[in-house]
Amino acid sequence: MTTTAELLKGAAELFPDEVVTQAHVRHLDLPKGAGRFALITLDNGLDHTKPTTFGPQSLAHLNVAIDQVEKEAADGGIVGVGITGKPFIFAVGADLKGVELLKRHEDALAIGKGGHDVFTRLSGLAVPTFAYYNGAAMGGGVEVGLHCSYRTVSKALPAFSLPEVFLGLVPGWGGCVLLPNLIGPDRAVSVIIENSLNQNKQLKGEQVFDLGIADALFEGADFLEQSLIWTASVLTGETEVARPELDRGAAWDEAVARGKAVADGKVHGAAPAAYRALDIIAAAKNAGSAREGFDTETLFALENVALADLIMGGELRSGLYAFHLVQKRAKRPAGAPDKALARPVTKVGVVGAGLMASQLALLFARRLEVPVVLTDIDQARIDKGVEYVHGEIDKLLLKGRVNQDKANRLKGLVTGHLDKAAAFGDADFVIEAVFEEMGVKQQVFAEVEAVVPEHAILATNTSSLSVTEMASKLKNPERVVGFHFFNPVAILPLLEIVRAEKTDDASLATAFAVAKSLKKTAVLVKDAPAFVVNRILTRFMGEIQNVIDEGTSVAVAEKAVEPLGLPMSPLVLLELVGPAIGLHVSETLHGAFPERFTVSPNLKAVVDAGKRGFYVYSAENGFKPELDPEVAALLQQGDAVLTEEQVRDRVLDAVAQEIGLMLDEGVVAEAQDIDLCLITGAGWPFHLGGITPYLDRAGVSERVTGKKFLAPGLASVPA
């Protein structure tokens, strides 16, 4: 029989570049005379910006540390064992750089089994064990703590999650079994499924405690000291930890069903990870608690198999490709000028005071913490815009996101003025967010240029118009940049930065510096019609509208793209964007590329009728979208009826063609930038790994363009 040490030694050969996490054991005397205690500290020896991970060698080091404390516990030399992390980091899970290199199912299975074999030793020691979540804890970092008898968490903990489903895996080192048996299945479904599929939502320290994952919550400044005092009180019997009784009847099944509904709503069955995790949660229903000695071998074997299956499937590699884009490429935007050229921005002007302009004003004030002044055509509009910003700040105060002093300061930064000269005379950066019409925007820029300092950047939030044409009548067109945000501004990370024909490096560098301060994912794009996201989405939506116009039913056209697992159907997305805006963008692109972009007469009829979308919603139908009878009456259709597969092929072919043309035109530096734009600006699913590897994988790109978009090995996603 292979020992844990032998298993990990074999697995280590597959991870040649692992950054090894050491497990240091030190001993201390607990307060209150509670006895001698062993504390294991996980530390990879790097600074706090480099997270601690678990690869095979790291697990082996932890295994050796447990060998030591196991003997000490058996000999009566210690009363308990604790595990914590280096400053700011507890541990963030498996070494994914190594996991994606695995080629054989048995090797993947060994990784799952190795983690289980080491972690379960903590729950099998002869003394109580304690996990002290002192900093960021994710994946296996969370799970190693779940194997302990007790857990404490720091109030300062910034990020805590089981993100595996988000990446295309399952929590495979005990999470799917132990978490529902600790906090109940419904809360576990929220953490494992719902949070993961909600763009990897993170929990803070207080939330971890409120959920019942941790037994005690302490301030960050003296977290370990307070945790040890609390540990002593538990060991002496002064403190008793009560755990809730779990309902193992219908409530468990209902929680699993809710998780399936969440998964269906997010990925529509197109990605297996969430469903595999739910199967294991369901199987853990009758497990009892870990301390009652349930059959962990059988349950953890389910995690091992699911983990191995998913590691060898395409979803993980897709998710990792997308994750690397967001984590790496987003931080080093291709084509961005030297950041040393950027000018300081000490005051921002916003032209317009509507909803988008007001959202921008709030964002600039919160992130840059500099004065922000709005202008508009009358005082009433200005007052409404400033009132909106102040109201949103009050909401942040009520939610505890800012304190009273910070709220007062932010409110004081945002003002309005009817006179552009008075408002923008000392502004360094002015952005317009007015009606999407070239003449209006050119007039606004002419008025702004006349009153701003010579160094001021003039930015436009246009979604589809030419920035070069917008700047063409100005005295200094070199300082004009496109600064295209996505709605809702506070949530979607993408910012398309557009270099016009005469934009200079200093202006562009300033734009990128501002984007970084705004905490946005900036991608440099060429001044081409509709830039990246809107151009691709309009082509995508245009084909859906075309097949409806030609005779395919709305239901079939919508259902055809469900297998992609997009966050919402095309016509629901149209409703979110607004049919009038969708029509305007399609008209703009039709003007630029009439052979590929059409203007749907049915969409125009919907807009002319003042409808907000194709659907209506009712409580009787559970607020599911139903085709509006008034819209149905407006539709004029032909007799060309397509199947779902035919619709899907047509849509994907159109998208592949458009991406190929955009790359030929140099709209972005590389295909990865298109993937990054769609992931961060349009919610393209992580599990598909970006639009271009998906089209490569499905054979669409070669069918349409004669070649793949990505070089071999760039996105190592199996077909």
Image (cartoon, rainbow, N blue to C red):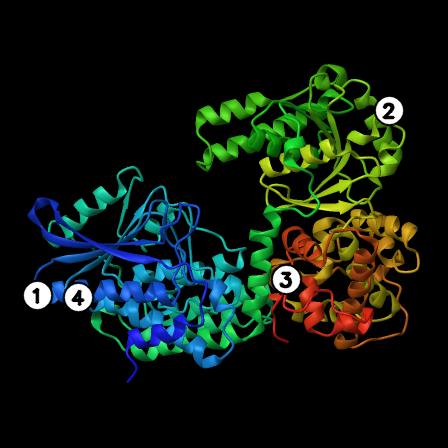
- Between 171 and 405, the one lying in front of the other is 171
Residue denoted by label 1: 75
Disc 3 vs disc 2: Cβ atoms closer than 8 Å? no
Question: Distance between the Cα atoms at labels 4 and 3?
Answer: 56 Å
Residue denoted by label 3: 624
**Residue 409 is at least partly visible in this image:** yes
**Which-is-in-front pick, marks 3 and 2?**
2
Q: Earlier in the sequence, mark 4 or mark 2?
A: 4
Q: Position of residue 435 (x, y in %)?
A: 80, 36
Question: Distance between the Cα atoms at labels 2 and 1?
Answer: 84 Å
- Between 384 and 646, the one lying in front of the other is 646
Disc 4 vs disc 2: Cβ atoms closer than 8 Å? no
Q: In this image, 52 relative to 423: left or right?
A: left
Identify the amino acid type marked 1: Asp
- Label number found at residue 475: 2
Question: Distance between the Cα atoms at labels 4 and 2?
Answer: 77 Å
The residue located at (60%, 55%) in the rendering is 325
Q: Position of residue 610 (x, y in %)?
A: 81, 48
Residue neighbourhood size for the residue with mark 2, other residues' Cα within 10 Å, grouped as few (<14), some (14–19), many (≥20) = few
Q: Position of residue 650 (x, y in %)?
A: 81, 70
Asked which secondary structure carries label 2, the reply is loop
The residue located at (21%, 42%) in the rendering is 225
**Residue 239 is at least partly visible in this image:** no
To which quarter of the image does residue 364 belong? top right
From the image, which quarter does the N terminus lie in?
bottom left
**Which-is-in-front pick, marks 3 and 1?**
1
Q: Earlier in the sequence, mark 2 or mark 1?
A: 1
Residue denoted by label 4: 70
Asked which secondary structure carries label 4, the reply is helix
Q: Earlier in the sequence, mark 1 or mark 4?
A: 4
Q: Is residue 718 above or below residue 483?
A: below
